[in-house]
Image (tube, rainbow, N blue to C red):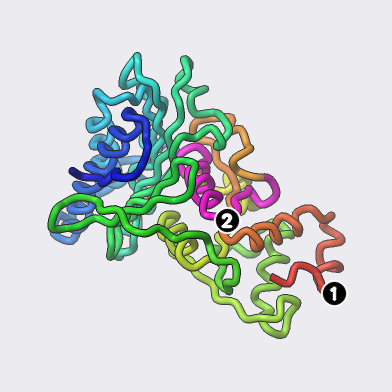
């Protein structure tokens, strides 16, 4: 048994797919832990559809998931590492989108990385199976390979969490965080890109940086791991907000994160934990991606913090500073 599904009323096909994902996760956790021994795993293997350099382990992970899902109810498989949707089972009822190894550039410095996945009911058309609203997901979650290897997922009714037991090589279910905390003082953003951000994002961060003397009336701490699963795991545990906006650099107008297999599943999970998830202004789960590898700006975390960012975007640019410089508003 690689995944304890006791107490979960999942359709057999979905339960089988989750078990297969968990089995690969167990193997990947061991492989990642051996990276310091098998240094060739970090050698580059070209560029994926996202324009990011592929590591050998990205490719290994992608192949492992595809192989594990062969013979399952997964009809279509969409991966960051594949140019197009791959058909696995002509009669399958599910469509699975995956980032096999998110944040793999952090392997060499021993920072937590992960696998992000999203499961939809399959449609006849392979692309249409994925180019749909995130509210149609059957499951969304991630496996994080860190000090603890955890599998965190939602099936549309709260959050479920497992921890890998290294002695039994299986994921044991544990108590999941009940709700994302609201009263937090942490935000995550790559501050080196400040000069490129849109005005509402800069205004929001300026208020955080102003600290106790500013309009927010409190001091904040910035966190930036550059690993989406690590940022998500922290926010699920202790709250805060994550921002990856679009900016004015070439190729960054829609940010860098992929909608289908990164942002949609994380948004599904975060909202099920009581948080919020938008592109800065509009809910991610209501958006329709126009391509398999489409990018989107992404803001998620404690609901009140995400709503505050939306409020900044709702104002005309010339009014943003004036209103929030007087500030009795949104003091959360």
Name the residue furthest front: 7
Query: Is 276 inside the magenta-drawn segment?
Result: yes
As measured in the structure, the alpha-carbon distance from the residue carrying label 1 to the one carrying label 2 is: 27 Å
Question: Image quarter for residue 282?
Answer: top right
Asked whether residue 101 appears in the rendered view, the answer is yes
* Closer to viewer: mark 1 or mark 2: 2
What residue is at 32 percent from the left and 58 percent from the top? 174
Q: Relative to 289, is 138 on the left or the right?
A: left
Identify the secondary structure beneath mark 2.
loop
Q: Relative to 192, is 202 on the left or the right?
A: right
Q: Position of residue 176 (x, y in %)?
A: 40, 58
Q: Position of residue 210 (x, y in %)?
A: 69, 79
User: Circle 1: is it few (<14), some (14-19), or many (20+) Cα within 10 Å?
Assistant: few
Q: Earlier in the sequence, mark 1 or mark 2?
A: 2
What residue is at 45 percent from the left and 20 percent from the top? 126
Near-viewer residue (265 or 290): 265
Q: Are marks 1 and 2 in contact (CB under 8 Å)?
A: no
Task: Report the residue marked by disc 1.
Answer: 326
What residue is at 18 percent from the left and 43 percent from the top? 1
Q: Position of residue 213 (x, y in %)?
A: 72, 85
Magenta segment, which residues? 258-282
Q: Is residue 207 above or below residue 284?
A: below
Task: Report the residue marked by disc 2.
Answer: 275
Q: Quadrant of the C terminus?
A: bottom right
What residue is at 58 percent from the left and 33 percent from the top? 133
Identify the secondary structure beneath mark 1.
helix
Asked whether residue 104 appears in the rendered view, the answer is no
Q: Is residue 114 above or below residue 79?
A: below
């Amino acid at each position: 048994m690689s995944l304890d599904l006791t107490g979960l009323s999942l359709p057999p096909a979905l339960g089988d797919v989750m078990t297969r994902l968990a089995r690969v996760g167990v193997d990947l956790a061991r492989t990642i832990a051996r990276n310091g021994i098998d240094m060739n795993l970090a050698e580059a293997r070209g560029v994926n559809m996202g324009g990011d350099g592929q590591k050998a382990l990205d490719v290994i992970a992608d192949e492992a998931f595809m192989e594990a899902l062969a013979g399952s109810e997964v009809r279509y498989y969409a991966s960051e590492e594949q140019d197009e949707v791959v058909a696995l089972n002509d009669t399958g009822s599910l469509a699975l989108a995956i980032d096999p190894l998110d944040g793999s550039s952090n392997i060499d410095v021993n920072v937590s990385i992960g696998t992000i996945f999203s499961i939809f009911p399959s449609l006849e058309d392979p692309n249409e199976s994925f180019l749909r609203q995130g509210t149609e997901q059957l499951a969304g979650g991630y496996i994080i390979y860190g000090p603890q290897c955890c599998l965190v997922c939602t099936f549309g009714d709260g959050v479920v969490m497992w921890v890998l037991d290294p002695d039994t090589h299986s994921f044991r279910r544990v108590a999941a965080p009940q709700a994302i905390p609201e009263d937090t003082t942490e935000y995550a953003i790559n501050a080196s890109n400040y000069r490129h951000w849109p005005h509402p994002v800069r205004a929001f961060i300026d208020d955080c940086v102003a600290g106790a003397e500013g309009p927010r009336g409190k001091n904040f701490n910035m966190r930036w791991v550059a690993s989406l699963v690590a940022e998500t795991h922290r926010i699920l545990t202790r709250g805060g907000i994550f921002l990856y906006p679009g900016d004015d650099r070439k190729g960054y107008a829609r940010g860098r994160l992929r909608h289908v297999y990164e942002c949609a599943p994380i948004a599904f999970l975060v909202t099920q934990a009581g948080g919020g998830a938008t592109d800065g202004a509009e809910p991610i789960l209501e958006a329709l991606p126009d391509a398999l590898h489409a990018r989107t700006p992404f803001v998620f975390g404690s609901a009140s913090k995400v709503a505050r960012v939306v409020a900044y975007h709702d104002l005309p640019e010339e009014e943003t500073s004036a209103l929030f410089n007087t500030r009795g508003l949104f003091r959360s």
